[in-house]
């Protein structure tokens, strides 16, 4: 029923044409559908449970007349799409923009520049707690969205009718809500504030993932931050969650163990100390101190430390064996 570049017949409020884009052959249609548009609504469906980077499944785009559901397990990103969405004269309308900006940045190298976030706007209009998309749609249009597919498996193919309907609904109201909110913000003299707050969220989404994470380590020592960043690097290289190497709560303990004084030739390292470090890691992923290491499970991390003489700060070299995971 759902073929590439074929109109999907769903009942949606607003009666927009809906298309499923699932082939590179549809690129011309996609670009032609967007090139003259001033307002573009965007949402994404992705999985972010067992990887360092989010895994993009579906990119939903709405215009004044169409909804485009782009299957990124079948459609490859192109420079044309990147250039189009990054244009400053196109306003990208989103809800809770940071996560979707992050997904586009990490998966498609698209760095959005001109964004309006309806969630942030609603906060300035009505105050109170931040509101989810369904609540905002209900308050403006009296339409209750179905949320049964929120936690469904978006990486499984084929996508079900319910998933496609849910995905289309998630962008259907973005542009109409923006048009209503913009009038309210101008009357309240809050438009500039909403734009500035949105820009901050977009900047956070466009930066490397480790930047915002390391900023949370306000009270961490220099060595703790080094080890934290080393963990981020390894997690990124292997596309695994950082907690798969070791959990945040063990950072101080691991740093303390690693930074214990050793002879230059690393002799005399105690095995019980190594075992303590191992106990801080999860499952088969092991952090090993010195030239000694225990091959337990599927992987080994080899860590080599050096203590500078004369009371200087501790320096260390972290070496990762090939085929860790």
Image (tube, grey):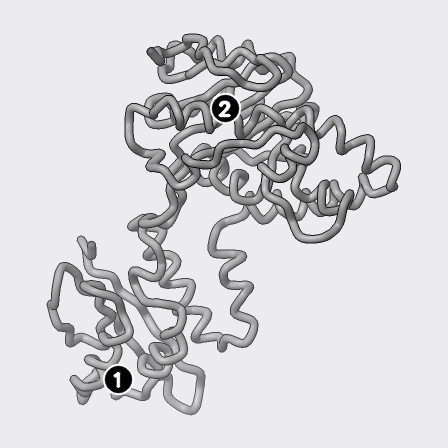
Height in image: 125 above or below 177?
Answer: below
The percent coordinates of residue 49 (x first, y second) are 35, 49
Q: Nearer the viewer, mark 2 or mark 1?
A: 2
Number of residues whose C-alpha sits closer than 10 Å to that of mark 1, classed few (under 14), some (14–19) or many (20 or more): few
Residue 168's disc is 2
Classify the position of the C terminus by image quarter: bottom left
Residue 141's quadrant in the figure? top right
Instruction: Estimate the spatial distance between the alpha carbons at disc 2 and disc 1, rounded to whole Å.
Output: 62 Å
Residue in the picture at 38% in, 76% down: 315
In this rendered view, identify the residue nearer to me: 146 or 125.
146
Which mark is first along the chain, 1 or 2? 2
Height in image: 59 above or below 300?
Answer: above
The percent coordinates of residue 22 (x first, y second) are 37, 17
Give the labeled residue for mark 1: 264
Q: Is residue 282 left or right of residue 68?
A: left
Q: Is residue 235 left or right of residue 9?
A: left
| Secondary structure beneath label 1 | loop
Classify the position of the N terminus by image quarter: top left
Residue in the picture at 25% in, 70% down: 287
Residue in the picture at 15% in, 73% down: 293
């Amino acid at each position: 029923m759902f073929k590439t570049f074929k109109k999907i017949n769903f009942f949606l409020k607003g009666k927009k044409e809906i298309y499923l884009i699932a082939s590179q052959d549809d690129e011309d249609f996609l670009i032609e559908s967007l090139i003259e548009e001033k307002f573009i609504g965007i949402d994404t469906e992705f999985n972010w449970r067992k990887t360092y980077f989010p895994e993009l499944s579906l990119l939903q785009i709405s215009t004044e007349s169409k909804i485009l559901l782009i299957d990124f397990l079948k459609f490859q990103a192109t420079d044309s799409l990147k250039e189009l969405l990054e244009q400053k004269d196109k306003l990208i309308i989103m809800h809770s923009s940071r996560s979707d900006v992050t997904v586009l940045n990490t998966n498609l190298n698209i760095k959005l520049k001109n964004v309006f976030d309806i969630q942030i706007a609603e906060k300035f209009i009505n105050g109170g707690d931040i509101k989810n998309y369904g609540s905002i749609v209900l308050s403006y249009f009296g339409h209750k969205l179905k949320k049964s597919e929120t936690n469904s498996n978006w990486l499984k193919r084929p996508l079900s009718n319910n998933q496609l309907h849910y995905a289309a609904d998630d962008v259907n109201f973005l542009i109409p809500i923006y048009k209503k909110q913009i009038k309210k913000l101008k009357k309240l003299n809050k438009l500039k504030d909403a734009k500035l707050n949105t820009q901050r969220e977009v900047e956070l989404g466009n930066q490397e993932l480790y930047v915002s994470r390391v900023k949370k380590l306000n009270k961490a020592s220099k060595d703790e931050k080094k080890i934290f960043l080393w963990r981020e690097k390894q997690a990124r290289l292997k596309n695994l969650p950082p907690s798969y190497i070791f959990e945040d709560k063990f950072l101080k303990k691991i740093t303390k163990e690693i930074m214990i004084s050793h002879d230059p030739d690393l002799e005399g390292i105690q095995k019980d100390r190594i075992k303590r470090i191992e106990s801080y890691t999860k499952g088969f992923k092991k952090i090993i101190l010195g030239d000694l290491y225990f091959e337990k499970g599927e992987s080994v991390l080899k860590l080599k430390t050096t203590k500078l003489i004369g009371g200087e700060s501790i320096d260390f070299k972290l070496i990762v064996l090939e085929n860790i995971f």
